Image (tube, rainbow, N blue to C red):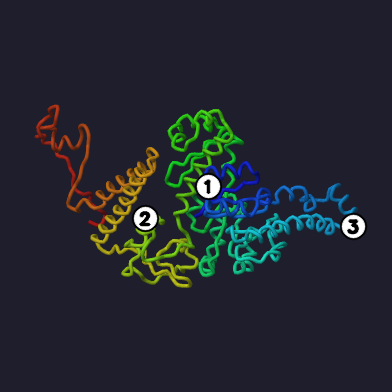
Amino acid sequence: MRVCLSGVVREERLDKILEAKVRSVVLDYSVVKDLSLDWFEDNRDQFDCIMLEYDLTGAWSRMKYLWGGETDRVLRAIEKHGSLSNAKEHLLSKLDQRVTSYLSFCNNIEGLIDVIWLPFLPNMGCSRWEKLLKSTKIGYTLWSFNEIDTIIHNYSYVGIPSSFDTEVVKVEMKPYIASLKSFGIKTHRWGRVDKETLLTGLFWSASSSNWLSGSKYGVTFEYVGNLKLVTHHGSKGSGKSVRNKLKSKCETLSLDHCLLMSDDRRTVDLWNLSQWEAYSTEANRVGGYWTKREAAVSKDQLPVVNNQTESSLATSSQFGSYLRTCNSCYLSANCPAFEPDNNCRISTTPKVDTPEDVQQLINKVIQIQGERVLFASMSERIQNAGLNPEVSSEMETLTKLMKDAREIASPIGEDEVLIKAKGSGVISRLFGGYGRSGGGSKPSTSERIIDISPMESEDD
């Protein structure tokens, strides 16, 4: 998934983006409208992906009162324009002029950018302006999933607002994965970049402006590897104190650690941008529904993708009929055996008819967990970001599995009796304590008989 940094609404922020060598960015029309065509030609090679948007949030906040309840302000607008609908249309027409100017600018530099996002309004989406621009690079942001059937074949990019819960998005988008693949449509997640979003495999890209919270609220970001971007919040007291440990990393990035400690805005932003860029580089290697399945995995893909492709869990000898369909399966974005409109061909039902089958299944479970431990350990060494607690957790799980496997594989026979006891009692009276450490008596020679015969049942 490609991570694009947004919130670039001022020229100073754009300068920091360039200085930090950020590869993917969402530029707002408020800052790019003053840039020349030459600027885009000179700086295009620095970016892997440039998206353009026009954030109308500020303009919408000044007019949304007309879509609320009946207030004195609304009544004055109705009196002035004759009706509520006329008042709404008057304000929207002002937005139309701004959007027309934005789209005209986009037409002039279309060849130098990757995605042109249609402006989005709450309660209305992008439909008001969808016919004003003819391009193969248009992005349409959904207002409701009810729109998806009508727009999915008309646009190259589909945006999902951050207000949509991730679990809801998973449910709503899964039926359309086959269409997204067939038509080469790319999805974008607005305002939410996290590991959960990344691992869904549903989003080609995502954007966030959280990198700005460092200079605003004293937040410090730190990429620790394993797709984890740790957020140290200033309000909780650790946002700035954690910077004491970042001196060596600052030297690597040619940043003045003293300025970082003194909360210099530029230095703080450049530090956070470097951490977001490191996270973005790793995130970009994780594929999804758009990833092409080839016989030879390219060097840019994670090794885990190749391992999954050659896994014994997906060999042709284990394929069989199954009720799950590929189109609706939650693994369809990454499954090496995915075929649109087909039933699942991977058998996941183990054979446990004999004790040998049980032993083989236990061995397979231990093998799977062992692979996880070794991969996690290798990742910890390669990333060189300190001790990863997840490695210790996986090792503990493997140890517990091996202990449980030993108990399962070594049952007590029907003719054996295993007795564990401490201190005196029946065991001592039967066998004595002779030979135990600390002394002990010889086996009992008492004539007293201890009856341990089975109890008679009522049927005897």
Which residue corresponds to the image point at 50% horizontal and 51% vertical from the top-left? 196
At label 1, the amino acid type is Val
Q: Which residue is mark 2?
A: 303
Instruction: Give the number of the mark in front: 1 or 3.
Output: 1
Q: Quadrant of residue 383?
A: top left
Callout 3–callout 2 Cβ contact below 8 Å = no
How far across and how far down the image is residue 451, in percent? 18, 43
Which residue corresponds to the image point at 21% horizontal and 49% vertical from the top-left? 454
Q: Which residue is mark 3?
A: 82
At label 2, the amino acid type is Pro
Q: Secondary structure at mark 1?
A: loop
- Please state which of residues 300 and 162 is positioned toward the viewer in this rendering: 300
Say left or right for 337 vs 68: left
Q: Which residue is mark 1?
A: 22
How far across and how far down the image is residue 370, in percent? 30, 50
Instruction: Give the number of the mark in front: 3 or 2.
Output: 2
Q: CA distance from mark 3 to mark 2?
A: 66 Å
Q: Secondary structure at mark 3?
A: loop
Q: CA distance from mark 1 to mark 3?
A: 51 Å
How far across and how far down the image is residue 283, in percent? 47, 51
Label 3 crowd (10 A; few <14 / some 14-19 / many >=20): few
